[in-house]
């Protein structure tokens, strides 16, 4: 009977140690997750800023010469459709 209690006591001790170990590991994973989330937010912010800069640069570009000429002639899409249909596929 005493040995059974000793075995049970040993198992409880191992369980307590494992619980402490898992809690410490969980805390480390939570800290790592927090850091990665902050890094991800920073990358998203950088990406949004880069997208804004690219969109601003694109807005500053003049329209392509072919499109500008077609728009000036008043034909617009009809002229570009005709040009596309007359091209030979490669």
Image: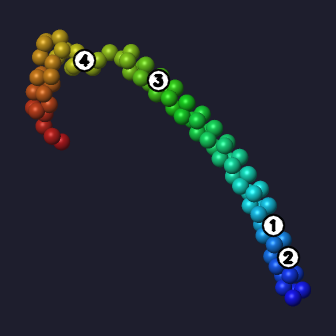
Q: Mark 4 or 2, which is nearer the eye? A: 2
Which quadrant of the view contains residue 88?
A: top left
Q: Quadrant of the C terminus?
A: top left
Secondary structure at numbered mark 1: helix
Task: Kindly report the distance in space between the C-alpha atoms of the residues bearing marks 1 and 3.
Answer: 54 Å
Task: Give whichever of 37, 52 is nearer the camera.
Answer: 37
Q: Residue furthest right?
A: 2
Q: How many marks?
A: 4
Task: Kindly report the distance in space between the C-alpha atoms of the residues bearing marks 3 and 2.
Answer: 64 Å
Residue at 65 percent of width and 47 percent of height: 33
For label 3, the residue is 52
x and y, in percent, of residue 71 in the image? 18, 14
Q: Earlier in the sequence, mark 3 or mark 2?
A: 2
Task: Give whichever of 63, 2 is nearer the camera.
Answer: 2
Q: Earlier in the sequence, mark 1 or mark 2?
A: 2
For label 4, the residue is 65
For label 2, the residue is 9
Q: Using residue 34 as the reference point, say whether residue 6 is left or right of it.
A: right
For label 1, the residue is 16
Secondary structure at numbered mark 2: helix
Q: Quick check: 9 above or below 24?
A: below
Residue at 39 percent of width and 15 percent of height: 60
Give neighbour class at mark 4: few <14, some 14-19, many 20+ (Cα, 10 Å): few
x and y, in percent, of residue 28 in the image? 73, 51
Secondary structure at numbered mark 4: helix
Task: Give whichever of 56, 38 is nearer the camera.
Answer: 38
Q: Mark 3 or 4, which is nearer the eye? A: 3
Q: Earlier in the sequence, mark 1 or mark 4?
A: 1
Q: Are marks 4 and 2 in contact (CB under 8 Å)?
A: no
Task: Kindly report the distance in space between the C-alpha atoms of the residues bearing marks 1 and 2.
Answer: 10 Å
x and y, in percent, of residue 4 in the image? 84, 85
Task: Kindly report the distance in space between the C-alpha atoms of the residues bearing marks 4 and 2.
Answer: 86 Å
């Amino acid at each position: 009977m005493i040995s059974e209690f000793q075995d049970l006591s040993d198992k409880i001790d191992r369980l307590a140690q494992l619980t402490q170990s898992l809690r410490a590991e969980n805390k480390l994973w939570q800290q790592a997750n927090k850091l990665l989330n902050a890094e991800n937010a920073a990358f998203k912010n950088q990406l949004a800023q880069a997208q804004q800069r690219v969109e601003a640069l694109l807005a500053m570009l003049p329209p392509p010469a072919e499109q500008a000429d077609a728009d000036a002639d008043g034909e617009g899409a009809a002229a570009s459709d005709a040009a596309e249909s007359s091209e030979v596929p490669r």
